Image (spheres, rainbow, N blue to C red):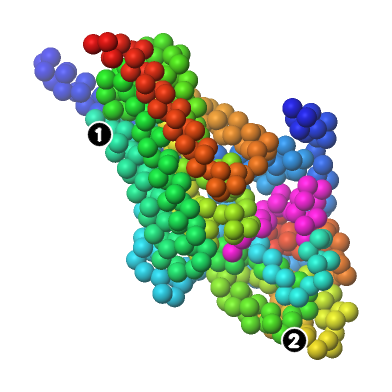
Amino acid sequence: MSGAHAVSALGAVRGVGAAAMVAQVVVVIGGAPLLTGLMRQVRARMEGRAGAGIAQPWRDVRKLMRKEPITPVRTGPAFRAAPLLLVVTAGVIAALVPLVSTATPVSGSADLILVVAVLALGTVSLALAGLDTGTAFGGMGASREMTVIALVEPTILLSVFALSIPAGSTNLPAIVAGAEHHPGRLASPAGALAAVALAVVVLAETGRLPVDNPATHLELTMVHEAMVLEYSGPDLALVELGSQMRLTVLLGLLASLFAPWGIATGASVGAACLGLLLLAVKVAVLGVLLAAAEVFWAKLRLFRVPELLAGSFLLALLAVTASYFLTGEGSR
Amino acid sequence: MNLLRKIRSTGRVAEPAPPRPTDAPPAAARELRGSAQVRHVDAGSCNGCEIEIGMAFGPVHDAERYGARLVASPRHADVLLVTGPVTRNMAEPLRRTVAAAAEPRLVVAVGDCALNCGEFAGGYGVEGAVGDVVPVDVEVRGCPPAPERIVAALRTVTGR
């Protein structure tokens, strides 16, 4: 009898965890265009404009989905596969990263290194697609994107390592659950340094100011946009949705790592619902802050970008060092 | 902080939205449903129309609130905003640009030059009006057309 109870309890745990994971993916897919719309709206209001409303990116996606698909001549499988790969990798990261709950069926595999690798897979597939078009701007965008990613990936790894040393694991749910139970870990100098380093690389990875201007029309200043110049119709819809999902997931990861309060650690439905609500609030707040900050920033000259990213890498390195010594690992 | 104070003291610059234009939208525009990516093509304009297009997308007229957005590539575009009399050197690039845009697509001819070559009619470098080179769906008159007219034309396309 008690065995049957234990089995059904275990089933309930699995059920809530799986529901939380599905909710994460659904909320990221549904909310990503709304986040972009919200950020454009904040920017519009600060510029004195009225703005198109936060649902505009969804209208764009709906329209693009109904348009004629075009495959430019002499493009190969890399060009055709990239949009889908970008969305799928963003979806996989949305499932892996502990945004709503740390007790999902995949939380055992949600390793930091896996997440960074899947993120890189999406970036590299888009860079290959940019090269595949054979246009000057596609190749230029791809080369710039690879330069940026070469500096970004190690910083993401290092800054999260600073948090994984006190947790004793590179498993993201373990880091988040640990930080939720011991908030003191985040208030340390290592936590602050890692937060700044990760925030800078999230800006670089998602192509925001000051690294890349998402609203630019000048091909010579483009990074992300230059790679996707040849996409149209449903493919473009996927590319846009994919990049919006990446921004949402990375802002969500930033929120989960440095403001983990409210993320469900158990199998309670109420906690998962609260986690979902808080996720939406946290990501919206981060998005509004980012959009407002972007009004004050100018894009950095491309050759200055490595300096910014090297600075953020240095902060991440300092965070790891501080974390190593301050948690007593060094004195063992 | 200066900029922040400026933003707060300036407030909203956008003028209240004028009533929706009553012109019947072209057939292709019905499928766009409130969203139109716009690519501007200068086929030989004197840049007068460009200044007005810039005004139409500026804070005062804010064409973006009706769902129109300027994009960098004809592959992303639903609407091609063509200005100027089409010069001999721009005739083929204009045809290719229109061919590069995915269906449903619309061509909006902006300014008197684009409609009938205007001041430049009969010039040795002029191939003809935009309508002689590619099919035109919406026409915006004026030399240069007022931003309100450009915004009204874009609103008939987006339907907002």
The kind of residue on which mark 2 rests is Glu
Q: Between B113 and A316, which is closer to the camera in this rendering?
A: A316
Q: Quick check: do tags 2 and 1 share a chain?
A: no
Image x and y of residue B47, in percent: 80, 67
Residue under the point 80% across and 89% down? B124
Image x and y of residue A280, in percent: 50, 30
Q: Secondary structure at mark 2?
A: strand
Among the 4 quarters of the image, the one containing residue A49: top right
Residue under the point 45% across and 57% down? A142
Q: Secondary structure at mark 1?
A: loop
Residue under the point 11% across and 18% down? A3
Q: Between A117 and A60, which is closer to the camera in this rendering?
A: A117
Chain part drawn in magenta: B53-73
Q: Is residue A131 above or below residue A148?
A: below
Side of A47 where A66 appears, left or right: left
Residue B54 at least partly seen: yes
Among the 4 quarters of the image, the one containing residue B37: bottom right
The residue under label 1 is A109
Query: Is residue B63 on the magenta stretch?
Result: yes
Q: Between A11 and A306, which is closer to the camera in this rendering?
A: A306
Residue B127: give its label: 2
Side of A138 where B62 appears, left or right: right
Q: Is residue A131 above or below residue A202?
A: below
The kind of residue on which mark 1 rests is Ser
Image x and y of residue A328, in percent: 30, 11
Residue A21 at least partly seen: no
Query: Is residue A320 on the magenta stretch?
Result: no
Residue under the point 83% across and 58% down? B148
